[in-house]
Amino acid sequence: MKINTNFRRRDVLKITAAGTCAIAATPFSANATPQSVQAEIDNLTGGKAFEDDARVVLTLPEIAENGGTVPLTVSINSPMSSEDHIKAVHVYADGNPLPEVASYYLGPFNGKAELSLRIRLSKTQSVVAVAQTNTGETWIGRKQVKVTLGGCGG
Amino acid sequence: MATKNIKPRVRVPKKLTKGQLFEVKTLVSHRMETGLRKDKETGATIPRDIIRSLNVTYNGRNVLYSVWHTAMSANPYTSFYVRAEDSGTMAFTWTDSANQTYTKEVAINVTG
């Protein structure tokens, strides 16, 4: 009997953790998780493991008051020469209803691998930027953002 | 289900010198409906209506291709860098989830 009660309590906790936003948004709440973001990264790299890299810097407010529009700058320390450049940058958020945010495809003509955008964050979570170089390397940068008002209401 | 009154806006420096690195700022007014929200009265899901991609060419050469998802804010803003080469045109094409496109062209003035 005790086990049964535990399970129930856990289910309740799970639903609460998913947040009011997800409940309002999707009845079959399939929220993004750090695991689903990792699955997206594995998809890009073919399952090869990569460590986080200090060359990928995410600039975001530490506390976002309005999750509906959070300014994000992804800056990657790369010479952007024809021999050594960033060819793609993928941005993920691990607590949103869907993990993907945006992908950008660059080249040496960009001169500087820096992108700014504004994103939606439904709750406090980590934003992950994955940079792919022309030489087949993958660099990953992360930053946690505290969200006081979720942004999935649009 | 294309949104009406889409206004694409682009800002680039007025004068550039050859080889100069410059920032291109883009903004398009669009509500970026996620497809996850429900109508409060009817309970029906509001269909997804988002800008899916932005493609930028500089004198015919592709300088940025970008794919967006629902987590891009309403009125999606993006800025990026390009190196100035020759005077000419920078052309921007946004494509929404109904495959409708919105375009904008700006002149690039390179001196010296």
Image (spheres, helix red, strand yellow):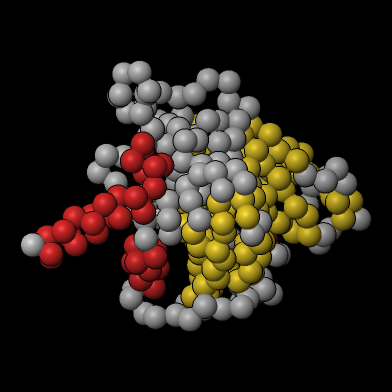
Left/right of residue A88 with respect to residue A24 in the rendered view: right
Name the residue: 46% across, 29% down.
Answer: B100
**Quick one: A132 or B89, which is closer to the camera?**
A132
Q: Position of residue B9 (x, y in %)?
A: 68, 34
Q: Position of residue B101 (x, y in %)?
A: 51, 31
Left/right of residue B81 with respect to residue A140 in the rendered view: right
- Residue at far right of view: B112
Q: Position of residue A75 (x, y in %)?
A: 66, 65
Residue A142 image-quadrant placement: bottom right
Left/right of residue A137 with respect to residue A26 in the rendered view: right
Q: Is residue B89 above or below residue A6?
A: above
- Residue at far front of view: A2
Name the residue: 16% across, 59% down.
Answer: A5
Q: Position of residue A56 (x, y in %)?
A: 60, 71
Left/right of residue B52 with respect to residue A65 in the rendered view: left
**Quick one: B6 or A58, which is closer to the camera?**
A58
The answer to whether one can see residue B60 in this image is: no
Name the residue: 49% across, 24% down.
Answer: B3
On-image quarter of the N terminus of chain A: bottom left
